[in-house]
Amino acid sequence: MEYEVLGTEDVPVTDLSEVDGVPPDLDIRPVGRTMGLDNLHVTLWYFEPDEEIQYHAHSEQEELYYVVEGEFSLKLGRSGEAETVEVGPGAFWAAGPEVGHGHRYVGDDEGVVLAVGAPAIEDPGLDPHNLD
């Protein structure tokens, strides 16, 4: 791909509750896949109150997050050292390989997070408590 321009509405919504074996049951817009990106996972995640991405880690992937809308409670850090941080719109956070991270939407309306991960490989979530 040389270049591409898309609007948010050009990326179809995927309801993860309809995909077997893929937690959590959230709605996403798979931006990177729609644009044909090979080296980045780029996804918009949509949250209702109390929905979350559970605390997890990846073996190789770095992830960067950006809060587009809403208030989130983050759990970040290695097992036994994790911190809880409250963030709102405009906040970034990142986690490297084998570093635990998760977030829960604590707002009242819809929350939206942009997630970017690299490399763009299948790197399923690991239990951070088993990495020590």
Image (cartoon, rainbow, N blue to C red):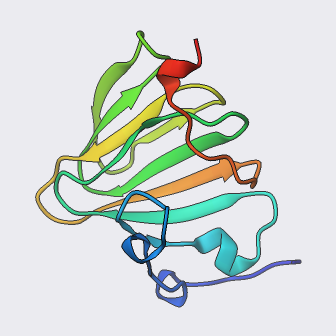
Please provide percent x and percent y for residue 103: 35, 41
Residue 106 in the image: above or below residue 29 = above
Rendered-image quadrant of the N terminus: bottom right
In this figure, what is the number of numbered marks?
0
Give the farthest residue toward the bottom: 10
Give the image quarter of residue 47.
bottom left
Give the image quarter of residue 46.
bottom left
Give the image quarter of residue 58.
top right
Give the side of residue 79 with respect to residue 10, left or right. Answer: left
Please provide percent x and percent y for residue 39: 80, 58
Residue 127 in the image: above or below residue 7 = above
At x 66%, y 80%, the residue is 34
Give the farthest residue toward the front: 20
Give the side of residue 67 with respect to residue 116, left or right. Answer: left
Please provide percent x and percent y for residue 18: 41, 77
Give the farthest residue toward the left: 108
In the image shown, does 125 or 72 lie closer to the viewer? 125
In the image shown, does 58 or 74 lie closer to the viewer? 58
Give the side of residue 1 with respect to residue 24, left or right. Answer: right
Please provide percent x and percent y for residue 69: 30, 59
At x 70%, y 78%, the residue is 35
Rendered-image quadrant of the C terminus: top right
Residue 56 in the image: above or below residue 24 = above
